[in-house]
Amino acid sequence: MDEDFGTFYERHVGVVTSYVARRVGGRPELVFDVVAETFARALENRAQYDATRGPEVAWLIGIARNLLYDAARRRRVDAAARRRLDMAPIHLDAEQLARIEERGAVDLRGALADLPADQREAVLRRVLAEQPYTAIAADIGCSEQVVRQRVSRGLARLRRTLEEENA
């Protein structure tokens, strides 16, 4: 993650927003809080990102998934990283909430269904099920590098599809 954080954010915010929105039932305030905290934690821990463990977007989805589990348990979204980074609270108006709803309405399930079967399986198993590359490779009978390539290509294609839908 050598690039400017704003560029990193812009490249991944659509996928993360879609992922979170599908899991919280279209509640834009909650989507905003989870996505904001996801990127705050990514910014705070960017030095810990390890590209050999998977693509950036998989790392972000993992952060978001953990925040969602924690929010369900606590009945609120933790804002600890945003506080540590001294980020001021943001108050959303109706237009901003509508934009979040629009971004979250992207058909992630349909976009996944449109991936080639090998890429879809690799993305689902690695990113959503958090299975290690070695286990996936052993199960499907290919090299770990092939699985990494399928995940990377699948996520890139998902990002392009979601960006086109949001354009």
Image (cartoon, grey):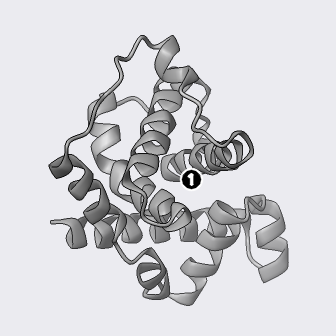
Image height of 136 relative to 75, above or below: below
Quarter of the figure with the N terminus? top left
- Crowding near pointer 1: few (<14 within 10 Å), some, many (20+)? many
Q: Is residue 126 left or right of residue 118?
A: right
> Which residue corresponds to mark 1?
58
In the displayed structure image, the side of residue 147 where residue 3 appears, left or right: left
Expressed as whole percent of the image width and height from the top left, the position of residue 4 reads 30, 28
Residue 35 vertical position relative to residue 1 in the rendered view, above or below: below
Image quarter of residue 91: top left
Q: What is the x, y in percent for residue 43?
A: 46, 26
Q: Position of residue 85 (x, y in %)?
A: 45, 14
**Along the viewing direction, whichever of 20 and 150 lies nearer the viewer:** 20
Quadrant location, the C terminus: bottom left
- Residue at point 84%, 73% (across, down): 138
In this rendering, the count of numbered labels is 1
Instruction: Please tell me whether mark 1 sits on a helix, a strand or a loop.
Output: helix
Q: Nearer the viewer, residue 161 or 100?
A: 100
Left/right placement of residue 135 relative to residue 55 reads right
Q: Amino acid at mark 1?
A: Ala
Identified at 21% across, 71% down, the residue is 164
